[in-house]
């Protein structure tokens, strides 16, 4: 399997500042192709480039930092791309090692969809970084309601094959579909049981309500508001990011039939807590995007142990490693 046709290196950091996930990744049998090259300072730093850490010097390296949920930082040379912005999560979540107020450098922001656990810090990040954001109209409407400069918002429907060009890469938005976890038998019951077992205090709930208000609750996020993004770097290396675990759309199938396989797919499935339901979402996603490497975007849960799946060559089997709590 060829990991990358032209880009020689790729890094994957699990939650800077958390320590535990980083150690967990190193202790597990990590694919050696993801080992950080020792000469690249950005690969050893625990700081995001977006918070003042080093950018990448080697033009053949793409640094991918996972920040929990579907929030990532991509660094390609001196280009910083932020995928979703959900940093300040409230007292029930582990501290990331930085706060939304610290995110001050970015060239572009992509918002997959408008729920608060994907864009609660987007408005603030746009102001602090000066970066533009690409988002669906539903997400854009929320940002406008928060006072974001309309000139910073690139609204996309993902229905028209549009390709946006930036220095060093292009971005193709494609209309996806949000996950429908409640279609899976048992998911609702699991969520209720979880909430009953780990109830929020009044203080925690108040903090989460403030964060929740910084996202959209438009029901059409399901079928109009979730954008999958395909990023193609100038050397041909291609990464797809899909921040919700919904079924494949005809737009995605048509786009990917034309584009061809991607090198990396970051694709969410985890809103379905039932394994069989996850498989029903994941396998068509794999078959559509045909990635060389799949990054499993995991979910939540607050202060509980976070399932971590390090990147691994794509196969028909999903690999899950759970670090100690
Ligand atoms: Zn959502």
Image: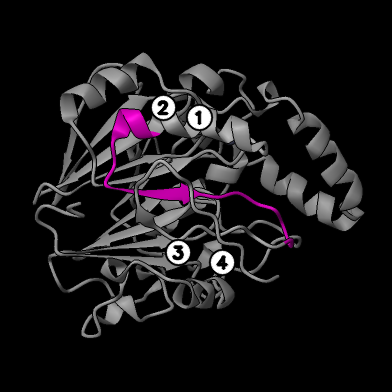
Q: Do the residues labelled 2 and 1 touch (CB within 8 Å)?
A: yes
> Tag 4: Cα neighbours inside 10 Å, few (<14), some, or many (≥20)?
some
Residue 37 visible in rendering: yes
In the image, 39 versus 98, the foreground residue is 39
Residue 81: x %, y % from top left: 32, 53
Quadrant, the C terminus: bottom right
In the image, 301 versus 114, the foreground residue is 301
Q: Nearer the viewer's eye, disc 3 or disc 1? A: 1
Residue 250: x %, y % from top left: 35, 14
Q: In this view, does 259 lie to the left or right of 190?
A: left
The residue beneath circle 1 is 281
Residue 114 visible in rendering: no
The residue beneath circle 3 is 103
Measuring 79% from the left and 38% from the top, which residue is drawn there? 191
- Give the residues drawn in magenta, as a range: 286-304
Residue farthest to the bottom, as pictured: 39
Q: Which of marks 2 and 3 is nearer the N terminus?
A: 3
Residue 99: image tag: 4
């Amino acid at each position: 399997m060829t990991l990358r046709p032209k880009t020689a290196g790729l890094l994957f950091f699990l939650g800077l500042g958390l320590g535990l996930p980083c150690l967990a990744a190193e202790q597990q049998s990590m694919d050696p192709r993801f080992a950080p090259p020792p000469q690249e300072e950005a690969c050893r730093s625990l700081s995001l480039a977006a918070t003042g850490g080093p950018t990448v010097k080697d033009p053949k390296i793409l640094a991918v930092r996972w920040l929990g949920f579907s929030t990532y930082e991509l660094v390609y040379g001196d280009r910083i791309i932020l995928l979703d912005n959900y940093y300040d999560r409230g007292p029930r979540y582990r501290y990331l090692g930085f706060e939304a107020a610290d995110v001050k450098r970015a060239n572009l922001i992509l918002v997959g969809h408008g729920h608060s656990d994907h864009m609660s810090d987007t408005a603030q990040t746009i102001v602090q970084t000066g970066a533009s954001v690409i988002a669906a109209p539903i997400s854009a409407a929320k940002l406008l309601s928060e006072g974001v400069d309309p000139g910073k918002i690139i609204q996309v429907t993902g229905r028209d094959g549009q390709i946006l060009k930036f220095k060093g890469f292009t971005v193709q938005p494609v209309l996806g579909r949000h996950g429908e976890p409640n279609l899976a038998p048992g998911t609702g019951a699991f969520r209720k049981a979880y909430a009953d077992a780990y109830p929020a205090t009044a203080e925690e709930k108040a903090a989460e309500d403030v964060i929740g208000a910084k996202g959209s609750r438009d029901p059409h996020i399901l079928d109009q508001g979730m954008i999958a993004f395909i990023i193609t770097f100038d050397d041909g290396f291609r990464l797809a990011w899909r921040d919700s675990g919904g079924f494949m759309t005809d737009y995605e199938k048509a786009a990917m039939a034309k584009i061809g396989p991607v090198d990396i797919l970051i694709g969410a499935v985890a809103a379905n807590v039932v394994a069989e339901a996850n498989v029903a979402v994941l396998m068509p996603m794999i078959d559509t995007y045909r990635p060389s490497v799949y990054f499993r975007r995991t979910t939540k849960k607050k202060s509980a142990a976070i399932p971590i799946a390090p990147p691994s060559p794509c196969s028909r089997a999903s690999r899950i490693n759970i670090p100690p709590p």
